[in-house]
Image (spheres, rainbow, N blue to C red):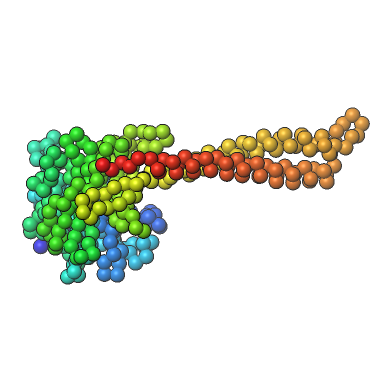
Amino acid sequence: MMNHSLIFARAYEKEAGGKIPASTRPIFHLTPWVGWMNDPNGFSYYRGQYHLFYQYYPYDTEWNSMHWGHAVSHDLLHWTYLPAALAPDAPYDSFGCFSGSAMELPDGKQLLLYTGVRKEGGDKGKEFQTQCIAVGDGLDYEKYAQNPVLDAKDLPEGLSPYDFRDPKIWRKPDGGYRCVVGARRMDKRGVLLLFGSEDAFHWHFESILAENDGRFGLMWECPDFFPLDGKHVLFVSPQDMLPEGFEYHNGNGTVCQIGTFDEETLKAGAEGFISATQKYLFPVYAVVCLVLAMIVVLIYTVLMHWLMAILFKVKFGNTLRVNTLTYAIIGIVEILGGLSVGFLLMFGVLLVINVLVNSLNKTAPAMA
């Protein structure tokens, strides 16, 4: 049964969103129908469409009590807005329906696994984070009567119930289910917890999948874990990373670690990582190389102009003059020579950068 908070949110977004001209929206990127959006959630393929949910506050363009917005697409380019999927309307998620994931159940229903947050102690109180479920048909979703399905009692000793969020669910080959959830120790270092279930509704703790040794920030948010080409890939979004060289100056980012998964110990082991250098700074280095190359080409052109003028000069009295043909020859040589020098410089610098990036990727693993 739909709660009044969700009914009101849907009515509001329908009216307010309809007043926003289509011409003011990006053609390519998805925006909220109205209000605020942040993290994408529950990206999945269900009943012939791509479903994308997102953290959403319809009533203003700033962060507040999180809802789940909802849009669908056939091609990931053209999106159709659907009514809000979740609103913070239950005691266990009254402070917000935080990030999560989605998948199709054997009975054809779509399951949303999300973090429900409640706040105790007033404005300065603690935010208790738990994992909750809603099930629906791709349009309307009903929250599970036994929510939350994971809470503080399911945490290993020494982990904080205030930072326990962002579950990613997947189905095992044998038909069971697993999910990985971000958490942290009392010293604020992030850990990733692995939970198992036979039916996707009743969950139990299995292992600490991976643990932050302090190299990548503190809390690890929004984890994803999946096999790829014989390896296992782990994505995390660390908070509060300290700058290191040219990297991590924004404090928060995303790190990809590539390694293995041991089915016996239920732990992940990293063999290397892909850092922000490749994703963000490599293009910056390329631009720097281009600028340097242009400066070198300019200097080269000036020097070549005078050199070629002397080599091909025609003397008229006391004045050095160059005829039209000679100017053409000089110009062609200057252009070809300048381009050659510039490209060689760019190639050399980019080659050095590539070696440095590859050496960074082979540094010691960050997962304990």
Say which residue appears at 52% left-offset and 40% top-offset.
352
On the image, the x and y values in percent for residue 96 come to 17, 48
Say which residue appears at 29% left-offset and 47% top-offset.
269
* Quadrant of the rendering where the N terminus is positioned: bottom left
- Tell me which corner region of the image, top left, top right, bottom left or bottom right, holds residue 4: bottom left
- Tell me which corner region of the image, top left, top right, bottom left or bottom right, holds residue 145: bottom left
Say which residue appears at 29% left-offset and 64% top-offset.
45
Q: Of 116 and 238, which appears nearest the observer?
A: 238
Q: In this view, does 297 lie to the left or right of 42?
A: right
Q: In this view, does 367 lie to the left or right of 206?
A: right
In this view, the residue farthest toward the front is 264
Say which residue appears at 19% left-offset and 46% top-offset.
208
Total labels drawn: 0
On the image, the x and y values in percent for residue 365 come to 33, 42
Height in image: 150 above or below 294? below
* Quadrant of the rendering where the C terminus is positioned: top left
Height in image: 187 above or below 337? above
Q: Of 18 and 88, which appears nearest the observer?
A: 88
Q: Of 223 and 90, which appears nearest the observer?
A: 223
Q: Can residue 186 be seen in this view?
A: yes
